[in-house]
Image (cartoon, grey):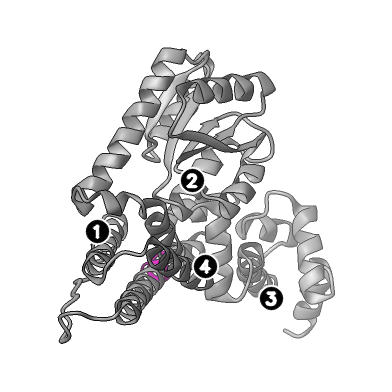
Amino acid sequence: MFTIMIVDDEKMIKRSLRAMIERAGEPYSVTGEATNGRNALELIHRHPPHLLITDICMPEMDGLELISEVRQQYPLTEIIVISGYGEFKFAQQALRYNVTDYLLKPVDPDEFVLTLQRIHERHRRDFQRLMGRSEQTWFFLEDTERIILMIWTLQETGLRREIDGFREKVETAGMDIVLAKEIYMNQLVYISQKLSELGGLTYKISYTEQDPHPSLEKLHEKFLVTCMGMYNNVVQLRNHAQSLQIRKAIRYVDSNFQDCNLSLTSAAKRASMSVTYFSRMFKEETGLSFMKYVTRLRMEMARELLASSDCMVGDVAKWIGYSDYHHFAKAFKKNTGITPTEYKKIQTLNL
């Protein structure tokens, strides 16, 4: 089945889209609905769909944030954006995330079904291009896509579970060893090609065996080892790329912490990451949350400035990035145990 998730805060829109999908018949299936991006992400984490259909303007987490998260974590998922005429500016931003299609409300039923068919057909052609025309390979398509997802999202436990499930499916099919070898080889080629498209990962697939008629056990062991090898390559690729981006963002923060407009959002944009993902990676790299890191930099400079007899207490807040003095004073006392004025007096007495 070609699985679809609908995300919109309007019940009538969700009901209308579901009805159009159901009228389209097989192979389309609605596997989830949500009223905002936050709820949608929770559902996606449990059951990633082939296609996400989302509105833009929604409470809690809007469509743009949702699209950004999905593109970061589930790059294989197709995305259709639906919006009203007054949301064109937001729609333009959504298109920058490389969404699959964009439809205006009210959604035209004929146009919608044609869009579904076009996306599904491209999905099939892509698989066929990499796998050839063997009918048996289609039987394993969803299993293979889940394996790709587990590799790309670095879910080792899930990956091993999917590989075990793949083995059981091959065994249940009762195919001969020659066909089983072809199936395993074709799946590895497809997995390797998709990972290459996603992140430039190159992995040479070799299924040469000294035994011309290997056992099913050996075929599966080779499949497992090769998949885990690709998993480890993605780990290395991701760690290197992320580390470079986070270090770039840290340098940006170190140079701009005095700017009162500095924010988690602007830093995440500098790293080309979603806010949620950047926040997590920033803390892993520095050991501090973004705000604690920025506050530490600002407090260090505040103490230096207050120690100088030429600096007025009221000016220090502005110089280190606080537009509100009371906010600065509260943060300073929390970090030092005394107010800026008290700190200034102590430093003056020690001169």
Out of 169 and 249, give the one closest to the viewer.
169
Does residue 246 show up magenta in the picture?
yes
What residue is pinned by disc 4?
158
Q: x, y percentage for residue 174? A: 36, 64
Whichever of labels 4 and 3 marks the residue nearer the N terminus, that label is 4
Q: CA distance from mark 4 to mark 3?
A: 55 Å
Find numbered disc 1 in the image and state the secondary structure of the residue it sits on.
Answer: helix
* 109 sits left or right of 120 in the view: right
Whichever of labels 4 and 2 marks the residue nearer the N terminus, that label is 2
Whichever of labels 1 and 4 marks the residue nearer the N terminus, that label is 4
What residue is pinned by disc 2?
68
Q: Which mark is residue 193?
A: 1
Magenta residues, start to end:
241-248
Would residue 264 be seen by someone viewing this image from the given angle? no
Whichever of labels 1 and 2 marks the residue nearer the N terminus, that label is 2
Q: Amino acid at mark 3?
A: Ala
Whichever of labels 2 and 3 marks the residue nearer the N terminus, that label is 2
Crowd around label 4: few <14 · some 14–19 · many ≥20 (10 Å): some
Q: x, y percentage for residue 211? A: 17, 85
